[in-house]
Image (tube, rainbow, N blue to C red):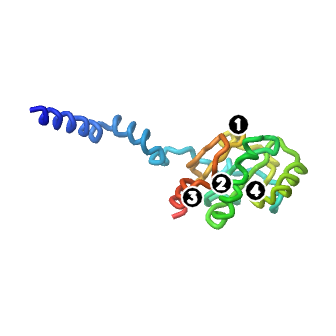
Amino acid sequence: MKKLIIYVVVLAVLGAIFLVPGIRNSLKDLFFPIATVENAVHIEADDYDIDLQGINVPSTNMKNFRNKPVFLNFWGTWCPPCRKEWPSIQRLYDRRKENIDFVLIAMKDEEVAVRKFLKENNYTVPVYIAQSPISEKILPKAFPTTFLLDENGRILIKEDAATDWDAESIHQFIDNIIK
């Protein structure tokens, strides 16, 4: 009798999970947040219109990175957490520069300080200083702030803390978006 009651309860719970959309969607969002990519914020064409002064690469406009996956990072030489994550960004760049575009924008910084920082550390990741306003959708409120955008301009990852960008989970995530 006990087994029958347990089976009925388990079936009722599973039925509720699979048949009640609110419960199913809540559990999906809780356990599989990447499954909510279809609800991601999109960066529109106008949001990409940022003139970028190249520091260790030619100057360009962010529009040239549309329709491609982009690693977009806002940082500053004055920011200790930003400096902390730089080695992992460089390693990610070295391993993934053929698969994804890298755009690192130095904020509230002087060009001389940025050039000195890159040279002292032998960093080769493309670095820019914005020369025009940045859309509110991506304007950072904290530093560092990093976005991983897919080729459609969807924000797949937004991280506003120092992160190990060379972690295997990041590489697997990139593999999934470049397929």
Q: Is residue 63 visible?
A: no
- Residue at 79%, 44% (x, y): give it: 76
Residue 165: x %, y % from top left: 63, 52
Quarter of the view holding residue 126: bottom right
Which residue is the site of mark 1? 142
Disc with the residue nearer the chain's start (3 vs 2): 2
Residue indicated by mark 2: 71
Q: Nearer the viewer, residue 76 or 41?
A: 76
The dot on residue 115 is: none
In this view, the residue in front, 68 or 17, is 17
Quarter of image, res 143: top right
- Most distant residue in the right direction: 112
Q: Which mark is residue 171?
A: 3
Q: Is residue 140 above or below residue 43?
A: above
- Name the kind of residue labelled 4 in the image: Asn
Label whose residue precedes the other's in the sequence (2 or 4): 4
Q: Mark 3 and mark 4: span between their CA atoms?
A: 27 Å
Distance between the alpha carbons at the discs numbered 3 and 2: 12 Å
The mark nearer the N terminus, 1 or 3, is 1
Q: Nearer the viewer, mark 2 or mark 4?
A: 2
Amino acid marked by disc 2: Phe
User: Which residue is label 4 attached to?
Assistant: 61
Q: Secondary structure at mark 4?
A: strand
